[in-house]
Image (spheres, grey):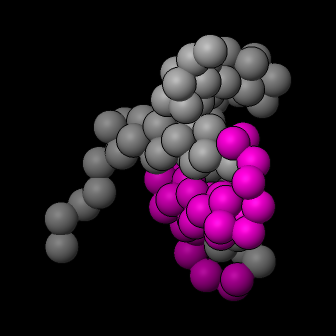
Amino acid sequence: MNDILDQARALVRGDRNRSYGSGVVEMERIGRMWGGLLDREPIDGPTVAMMMVSLKLVRATVRDNPDDLVDCAGYLLIAGDGRMHNPPVEQ
């Protein structure tokens, strides 16, 4: 069996990419929607991915489901991809 990182990479680069498209693009879309719901500027995609990591970490603390850790790693991969394509602006 593959380890968590291999499983996450296979999902993000394979099945999920074929089903939903680029995770980076999807996180940007979610960020625009969340920004609208919160009546604020859009949330950048890598930050959305990190917020999803937080959600999965909370779930992992209340139940023993290995998928939560795989999803966590997948969101971290997407956050990293997003930062590589759109590095944060230094302030």
Query: Magenta stretch?
Result: 38-67
The answer to whether residue 43 is above or below residue 27 is below
User: Could you tell me which quadrant the N terminus lies in?
Assistant: top right
Q: Which residue is drawn at 66% across and 24% down?
A: 11
Residue 39, image x, y percentages:
69, 84
The answer to whether residue 6 is visible is: yes
Q: Residue at x 37, y 36 (%)?
A: 85
Horizontal side of 38 relative to 80 (left or right) equals right
- Is residue 69 found inside the magenta-colored segment of the image? no
Q: Foreground: 28 or 12?
A: 12
The answer to whether residue 40 is above or below residue 21 is below
* Image quarter of residue 74: top right
User: Could you tell me which quadrant the C terminus lies in?
Assistant: bottom left
Q: Which residue is drawn at 69% across and 42% down?
A: 66
- Is residue 66 found inside the magenta-colored segment of the image? yes
Residue 13, image x, y percentages:
59, 19
Horizontal side of 30 relative to 48 (left or right) equals right
Q: Foreground: 62 or 36?
A: 62
Horizontal side of 86 relative to 48 (left or right) equals left
